[in-house]
């Protein structure tokens, strides 16, 4: 095994000596430390040795690992320097301004958010903001969410340690603070502070205990809308979402309502947009948001007379809209700060 370890170092020095391209480097690196690499295979051999030989062999393995890391790091540095030289020339004066004159641009999620706000602001909606740390009352109780509702479980919502203290005023003595799972809490706070008629959008960051994958994130962004006035009906809600679809997707775009359940609204709907307008093949509709008429119980909780006022609310995920509009198939791309990805959305 000693000879095998020595030969790995010699082979690595030989194979990396003339590398000039990053793709070549990655291929050679995989030959040694990849899942099927020669060094990886030798590391696995330690389990087959007698116990008394394992400590000494482990030290040798660690020594070879450090040598390999040094060789690979030096090789990558040399390749990066070569790439930089090819881009801007061999003479580099660090006191000079950057030759890259490309200006930065808004993040694609910001672009989508601003687009949505712009569409609704044309018909009188204004933006309202709120805190990301909220109490259970504003996130659940005032929204007609029962104490035993699954959304309030620890596996769905991030609860703050009970010892923590915040300036947000609690409505109940025994309620806890949470990282808000939606921006509906902003609507509750607005209705408590202001009198109808109300016409607001509440965009912002929200948090849920989701495992990160291609379509889920524990931290994402929502935008919700609320309109409270006299004599509002489901047809008014349908009209505003028809308008939104036409402004976002084109003048002949339509929306589809499907009955659903949300504690906050009654009746409630899920809303679909036409897949063809979003460049999707094989599907006719794509689910885009939830909405409904504000439940009278919610109005009672905030001191608004449900016999005098009605209202509607809707909410959608910014990432969801961005993924569909831009054709992005993995939500994680929005958070990786990869310049190659972000440059595609430069204006």
Image (tube, rainbow, N blue to C red):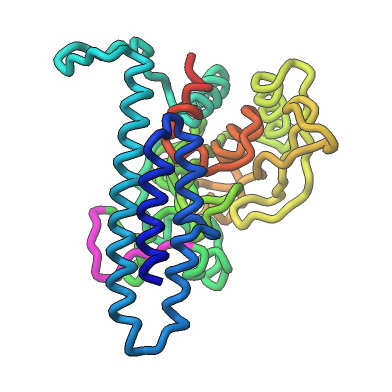
Residue 293 is inside the magenta segment: no
Residue positioned most to the front:
3
In the drawing, does residue 108 fall left or right of residue 70? right
Q: Quadrant of the N terminus?
A: bottom left
Q: Is residue 162 magenta?
A: yes
Report the residue that reaches farthest toward the left: 95
Near-viewer residue (260 or 318): 318
Q: Residue at x 48, y 42 (%)?
A: 26
Whether 314 is drawn above or below 172: the answer is above
Q: Position of residue 114 (x, y in %)?
A: 48, 24
In the image, residue 164 sits, relative to residue 284, either above or below, namely below
Residue at 22 percent across and 15 percent down: it is 92
**Residue 162: x, y in percent?**
29, 70
Q: Look at the image and give the residue range highlighted in magenta.
A: 157-167
Q: Residue at x 30, y 66 (%)?
A: 62
Say which of 170 and 158 sits in front: 158
Where is residue 235 shown, x and y percent of the image?
Answer: 74, 33
Count every numbered label the image shows and give the total: 0
Q: Quadrant of residue 284?
A: top right
Q: Is residue 94 left or right of residue 341?
A: left
Magenta portion: prevailing SS class: loop
Of 166 and 77, the residue lying toward us: 77
In depth, the one of 250 and 14 nearer the eye is 14
Residue 310 showing in the rendered view: no
Q: Residue at x 55, y 38 (%)?
A: 319
x, y percent for residue 93: 18, 14
| Residue 219 in sight in this render | yes
């Amino acid at each position: 095994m000693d000879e095998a370890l020595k030969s790995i170092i010699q082979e690595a020095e030989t194979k990396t000596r003339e590398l000039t391209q990053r793709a070549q480097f990655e291929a050679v690196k995989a030959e040694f430390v990849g899942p099927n690499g020669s060094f990886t295979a030798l590391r696995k051999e330690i389990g087959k040795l007698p116990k008394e030989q394992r400590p000494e062999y482990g030290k040798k393995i660690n020594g070879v690992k450090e040598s390999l890391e040094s060789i690979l790091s030096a090789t990558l540095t040399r390749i990066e320097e070569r790439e930089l030289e090819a881009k801007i020339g061999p003479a580099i004066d660090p006191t000079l301004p950057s030759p890259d004159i490309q200006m930065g641009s808004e993040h694609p999620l910001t672009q989508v958010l601003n687009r949505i706000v712009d569409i609704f602001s044309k018909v009188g909606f204004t933006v309202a903001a709120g805190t990301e740390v909220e109490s259970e009352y504003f996130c659940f109780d005032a929204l007609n969410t029962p104490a035993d509702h699954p959304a309030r479980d620890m596996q769905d919502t991030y609860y703050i340690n009970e010892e923590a203290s915040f300036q947000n005023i609690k409505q109940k003595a025994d309620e806890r603070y949470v990282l808000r799972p939606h921006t509906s809490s902003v609507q509750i706070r607005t209705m408590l502070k202001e009198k109808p008629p109300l016409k607001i959008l509440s965009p912002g960051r929200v948090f849920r205990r989701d495992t990160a994958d291609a379509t889920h994130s524990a931290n994402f962004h929502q935008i919700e809308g609320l309109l409270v006035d006299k004599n509002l009906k489901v047809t008014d809600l349908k009209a505003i979402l028809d308008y939104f679809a036409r402004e976002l997707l084109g003048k002949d775009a339509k929306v589809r309502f499907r009955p659903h359940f949300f504690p906050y609204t009654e009746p409630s709907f899920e809303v679909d947009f036409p897949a063809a307008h979003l460049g999707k093949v094989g599907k006719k509709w794509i689910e885009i948001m939830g909405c409904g008429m504000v439940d009278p119980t919610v109005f009672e909780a905030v001191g608004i007379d449900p016999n005098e006022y009605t209202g509607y609310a809707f909410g959608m995920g910014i990432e969801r809209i961005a993924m569909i509009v831009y054709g992005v198939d993995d939500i994680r791309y929005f958070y990786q700060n990869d310049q190659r990805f972000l440059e595609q959305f430069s204006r």
